[in-house]
Structure formats: structure tokens, C-alpha cells
Amino acid sequence: MKRTLIKEILLSGEAGTEVNIKGWVRTKRGSKSVNFIAMNDGTCLGNLQVVADVASFDEDTLKDTTTGAALSVTGKLVASQGSGQSVEIQAEKIEVLGTADPEKYPIQPKKHTLEFLRENAHLRMRTNTFSAVFRIRHAMIFAVHKFFSEKNFYNIHTPIITSSDAEGAGEMFRVTTLPFDETPRNEEGEVDYSQDFFGKSTNLTVSGQLEGELAAMALGQIYTFGPTFRAENSNTSRHLAEFWMIEPEMAFADLNDNMDLAEEFLKYLIQYALDNCNEDLEFLAKRQEEDEKNKPKEERNMNLIEKLQFVADNDFVRLTYTEAIDILRNSKPNKKGKFKYPVEGFGTDLQSEHERYLVEKKFKKPVILTDYPADIKAFYMRVNDDNKTVAAMDILFPQIGEIVGGSQREERLDVLEAKMDEMGIPKEEMSWYIDTRRFGGAPHAGFGLGFERLISFVTGMGNIRDVIPFPRAPKTCEF
Ligand code: 4AD
Ligand code: MG
């Protein structure tokens, strides 16, 4: 018999229909005469209740239907006596496909802490919390493609192995096939990458932007959506060593077009989650409300769904970096009246405490900061007329801090080349990039959205390691 998904049964199952389901036991309770087994197959939050008359099954089968076991159940849908669901299955046949020793299976039917589940990351997707998070993650992937496709942006796969450092921050993972023991070295004692697989030094990409720019200067509007890698030694709840980034790039666009696109995109994604992931969001909202009760009143977060609707419905604040510095210098962020990292003035690189102050305390809205000092930003950003700032933008979100980073690109060949010289970026090795300015160069702009930061925001999960199925961070590379 063909398997029916539990989601379909809960949505539209009709009493009297004969069905087969396959899934995992969440809980079992019952009496001497009847067992009630709650089954989940991952397709939705809800469980389907299986009713098994003890007398109709052999003892071993029912003994093995413990939490975590995989079952195939065939039977008739009947109207449910219990509340919360319209149908249940009166089991005729139960096959135990895989047992889960209750003495050893770590995921028990109770609320586990997120720390415990992180330690059992290989099994945590079997909980309601994590299956909800990863269903929402899927919906967001789909919404990203839908948004851009509807706007005539083309998805470009940019390389994962690259020979350049797009961000110039030197946080790259090296890719090499050279043997550890007999690494070839030149006369100066440096590793001789000419003998390596690609004949040069290569690394995992930190961003698809530079290749994305090449594509935008041909296809007009493109976006990348791929894994990116950063060897920054940041053990925070906002950083991963491997994360996914969406990077749109538009030819014939300036910083204002860029901000408009980013704001529209973020609101679209959030509204998509509200419209399509309601059951999972309600579940996560309730989970967080329980956690919030343990916090002092002034530290409690807004209800997850209200927060998402608020961001989807309201304009973001737009202000320049210089204006933000003024605000920060004149503010008293806490009882002590001081930031941990003092804001000295123009040139200060904003820390997450500053960003969060602006968003959570000052404006209580997402903020787009523009026109950062050239010195603290990447080489490719367009220099403003003041010669001090660049046409950059960062979007700051409550509880997250920076969620988007982007800019208008330096399209003027002479200015770009001078900047590359100044920053010590090898022009010969990047002549492919400079060619976009040499041949048919035009104003263009783009940004990068950190996908996991988006998912953290949408799901309300406070730790970024809880929104990617297999997190990589310093000293964390299980699987
Ligand atoms: O600000 P970033 O470094 O910008 C770029 O990479 C540009 N090339 C983007 C572009 O203009 N096309 O990174 C963009 C975003 C950040 O705003 C943040 O959301 C996310 O990527 N991000 C990280 N997310 C998780 N873990 C990390 N270690 C991250 N580093 C950046
Ligand atoms: Mg950034």
C-alpha cells in the first residue's frame, strides 16, 4: 500500500479511508487493553495518533514501539475522540522498521535544553523545535528563489574554490593537496604552491560577490546563493565558519536602489514565513514565551510573530555612519552610561553592542547605516565625493545586529586601481575583475544577506548554531 504523509492526513484525511503511514514514535501511552502511539514523519509539527488494541498485536511488536522507533502502520482513519485532531488511525498492521532502545536513545519526550540538543546534533532534527526550524529554513530557501525569479534576477553558481580573497580580511580556509610531511618549499622557505593541484594557492570562498559582479555585467541582474567560509576565530552566537549567503548584484544601480531592494527582499521573506509557516512559527513563539518568563521584565523580547509582523510592515530607518556615531557618542546605553567599547568618533568600527543599541533602544526598528569610513571597508566599495567615506550599507536587525552588508561598487577604473594599490591587492592576479571596468564598465551595486542570520531572526533562535543542520565553528566539526 502506498504511504500517505501525516501532513496530508491531518489536513484532509477522511474517516473511513484505509491508509499506510511511516514515521517515528514520539510518545506512547495506554492501558492493558489499548495503546495510543503518537507518530510523526517530519512533514509537519502535528503527530498522528495510532490506536492499537493490545489483543490484536503480539507482545513484542507493542513492546518495541518506544519513543524514537520507526514504524509502518496500516489501518483505517476514524474520527478522533481526543481534542486537537479530527482523525486517528485504528491500527490493523504495525511493522517495527527500527527499534530505539529507550535506555540509550537520548531524545526523550520532554523539553530538552538547546545545549543538550547541540551535543546530540546528529539526532536533534527529530525534535519539534529543530524540525520546525528546518522546515522554516526550507521555506526561506524557496522564497529567496521565488523573489528573485519574479524580479528577473538570474541565479548564478559562483565557485567554492577560489584563488582570490573577496573581502580582503584574510580569513580564508586554504585548499591544498600538498602533503603535510614533504611540503615543497621555494628557496625562501615559503610553500611552493606552483606544485599544488591548481598551480597556485587556493582557498574556500568567503563571498561570491566578485564573480557575481562579472555575471551582473552580462546578465544585468543576478544573485548567488551558496556556502561561504570564514576562518574567523569568533566563538559567538552570530558567527559560523561555514554559512550560506545570498548575494544579489545589479548593473545600472546605485546605493539607493540597493537599499530599496534589500529592504523589500527582507520584508518579503519575513512575510512569506508568516504566510506559509504559521504552525511552526506559533510553536516556536510559544516555546520562547516560556523561556522569556525566566527573564526580568525589561529584558523580555517581543512575541516572535508580532516582532516579524512589525518588521514586515514598517519602514527601516536610514542614516549615515557619521550620524550614527553622533548618536552613540551622546547616549547612555545602560546604568553605567557607557559602552564596553568606547565610541571615539569617525573611524570607530562599530561593535555589535553599538549596532544593537541603535536598533533595540534608540530606534526600535531595523536600521540601514550608510557611508562608512573607507578605511574600515573593502576595496571594491565606491568612494564618495568627500573622499573619506564609501557608498556602503549595513542593515542592522534587533537581536541579530548586522544581517546584510552591501555597497555600490567602484566602477571607475582609475579609482579602483589606485585603491587596490593602496590596499596591497595584486592587480595582475585580479585582471579578470578589473576587466569589468575596462570593458563596458557601468555603475552597479549589490549586497550579501547572511542566510543563517535571517533564519535566526525568523525563528527567534538565539544561537546561530541552532539554525543550520550541521554547524561548523571553532573546534566544532562533528560529522
Ligand atoms: O558583510 P559581509 O562580509 O559582506 C560580504 O561578504 C559582501 N561580499 C557582500 C556583498 O556585498 N555581496 O557579509 C555579508 C553578510 C553579513 O551581513 C552577515 O549577515 C553574514 O554575511 N555573515 C556571517 N554569517 C554567519 N557567520 C559569519 N561568520 C558571517 N560573516 C558574515
Ligand atoms: Mg559586513
Image: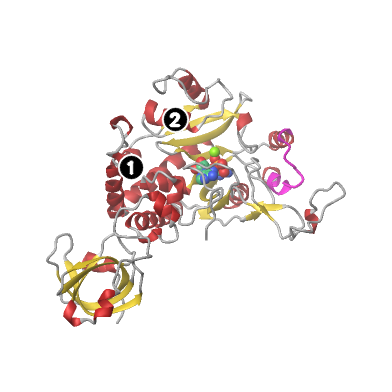
Mark pair 1, 2: CA separation = 19 Å
Q: Mark 2: which secondary structure?
A: strand
The residue type indicated by label 1 comes to Leu
Give coordinates of residue 50: x percent, y percent. 22, 71
The x, y position of residue 78, in whole percent, is 15, 73
Whether residue 296 sits left or right of residue 321 in the image: it is left
Q: Going 46% across and 42% down the picture, which residue do you hit?
A: 237
Q: In the image, what residue type sits under mark 2?
A: Arg
Residue furthest to the left in view is 81
Quarter of the N terminus within the rendering: bottom left
Query: Who comes first in sequence, dot 1 or dot 2?
Result: 1
Display coloring: secondary structure
Few, some or many residues within 10 Å of mark 1 (<14, 14–19, 20+): many
302, above or below 285, in the image: above
Residue indicated by mark 2:
318
Reading the image, the residue beneath label 1 is 308
Nearer mark to the viewer, of 1 and 2? 1
Horizontal relation, residue 119 to residue 460: left or right: right
Classify 10 Å Cα crowding around label 2: few (below 14), some (14-19), many (20 and above). some
Tell me the quarter of the picture where residue 364 sits.
top left
For residue 123, which quarter of the picture? bottom left
Stretch in magenta = 422-435
